[in-house]
Amino acid sequence: MTNTTYTDKDIKVLEQLDHVRKNRGMYIGDSSNPNHLIYELLDNALDESQGGHATVIGIQIDTKTGEVAVADNGRGIPFENDTIVTVCTKLFSGAKFNKGENGVYKIASGLHGIGIVAVNALSEWLEVDVYRDKKHVHYKFVDAKVVDKKVENFEGTVPFSTQMKFKPDKKYFESLNFDIKSLQDRLHLASVHIDHLKLLLIIDGQRHIIDCDANDFFKDELLEKSSDKITQIFHLSYKVKDEEVSARFCWDFEGSTTSKIIGSVNLLRVDAGTHTNYTLDVFRDIFFEIVEKEKRKITKNDCLIGLRCFTSVFLYEPQYNSQTKEKLTVPKKNLSHLFDQLASKFRILLLKNDELRQSLLKHFETYRSKQNAKDNIIKSGKTITRLNSTIDSKLRDCTTHTISNSELFITEGTSAGTCLIQCRDPKIHAILSLKGKIQNIADESKDFFKNKEIIEIINALGTGVEPEFDIESLRYGKIIIAPDGDPDGAHIATLLLTVFLKLVPKLIDKGVIYLAQMPLYGTVVGGKFLPLHSKEDADKYSQDHANTKIQRYKGLGEMNPDQLYVSLIDTNTRRLLRVPPPKDPQKIFNLMTDANLKRQLV
């Protein structure tokens, strides 16, 4: 052990700005780029706008020099007694401690008097210009110290009330490249909430006016582009003096069943915490009141299936888990005066709209019946267990624990599976033999989770299905559909691909689903089997090799193990087609269920 001393001389007291620099993650969170410095100044300008004092906010960025300016036409920072020096250099200084109904800032994004100080501490220089009370005041800080101060009379047209201009110091950030997309997202959120506010973003001299409609914002953030089967987008809100809750929501009957909810607090994007949790409680509780009265077979959480919701709140005293404000931690009881009224409005909406209520209840009941059937499906698990007795006995598993080397062959009929078992390598090849044609699951009306063959496939994969789907629990590196080479085999392959596309589409996206190209014909050359995949191949070979016996195979069950080895196991001779992700899965499902569409293709 190193011999060290520990005395009073080892006790250090950091100056406030040094503490910010040494512990910047504590003050600004992510230091990969300087975006958070812009956000701190933007929040101050937005607070002026929320109070009805600023109607224009401009942000100018020069990506070549790294310089940024944020300006607004609000009231302007008071400058008497060097107040500007105080708010730029002293932590926990500012007017936002006096919030609430009678405060200077009734509703504010900033909380702790830290933002401007952090910008000053982490910049090479900071310039502050204020036009107020017929005066123009200018301060310049270099290395967070005042190097210039001017106070002069001003009678002309005021260009802005407050402007903060700074250049981030590269030694405090991994990169000085700004994330423009994230900044635009922040401005879009502000535009949605403040009707009277004009937002201007100038990047390298190019002007962008930010103007975002609330429903457009909702669709961009929460709705899948491919889904058209959604309810109307509803909007409910309730306001008590300056505090407010607003919920914009709909249900998506076609997209992911998992609910999606995002949120904001005082114009800050905050998805997690009391406000979003409380909203989900409102939906559960009100729906379940109705469910119990109507005696529907739905659990409480089923009422969130397909829900898409954006909840925003404006609060006098928001509380967060940290300075970076990622989660709202206000106690639930402190928001009951807002959310109790939101619940009342939601109850009235459902009771007055019988068509909507019945449509949603039917949607939830359908989901519940499918979930009950899924009880037969093994949920995904992180551990790969070979020779697992919980999986159907039709699966002849492999023994390797190296997933990337393993292959699962899905065949039609036990005879094909039996021959394949004889020629496989049991270390890496697993065989699942299905009985006859599998059910067409493109039709939503059918309860396909009662189908034993489908359950066997999902159980063999190990991933489970949504919402328990876990791609990390996949038990094989390749899943190979091995149908017979005739039209009947092609039909079965199509039905199997529909199962993957409908229940585990991420496996197709991952590129692990393959279709084996099985030969319709074959012959023996020099004692070795030569597969001939089509009639054209067979005819050509027969013309080139007279008196050669060519055999026609109706299915895999007619092949000997050595012939199956060449056609399906040997990586040098087999033909596998990787199944690509389709551009529009819904078109495929429509084709699988609509007889008229099929006839048009014939």
Image (tube, rainbow, N blue to C red):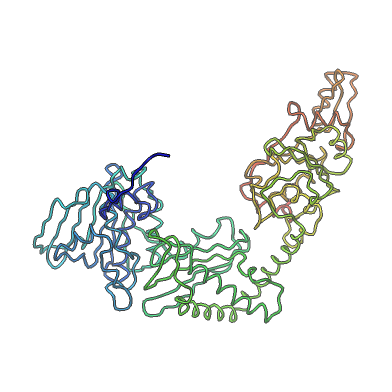
Q: Nearer the viewer, residue 466 or 15?
A: 15
Q: Picture coordinates of residue 112 (x, y %)?
A: 32, 64
Q: Picture coordinates of residue 295 (x, y %)?
A: 71, 79
The residue lying at 31 percent from left, 44 percent from top is: 63
Q: Give the answer, above or below, for where 560 lies relative to 353.
A: above
Q: Nearer the viewer, residue 237 or 492?
A: 237
The residue lying at 43 percent from left, 70 percent from top is: 313
Say if residue 91 shows up in the picture: yes
Q: Is residue 385 left or right of residue 329?
A: right
> Looking at the rendering, which quadrant does residue 129 occupy?
bottom left
Which residue of the protein is positioned furthest toward the left in this rendering? 153
Query: How many numbered discs sit on the rendered protein?
Result: 0
Quadrant location of the N terminus in the rendered image: top left
Q: Is residue 58 left or right of residue 33?
A: left
Q: Nearer the viewer, residue 104 or 389?
A: 389
Q: Picture coordinates of residue 583 (x, y %)?
A: 61, 47
Q: Is residue 601 left or right of residue 104?
A: right
Q: Give the answer, above or below, for where 471 lies relative to 199.
A: above
Say if residue 205 shows up in the picture: no
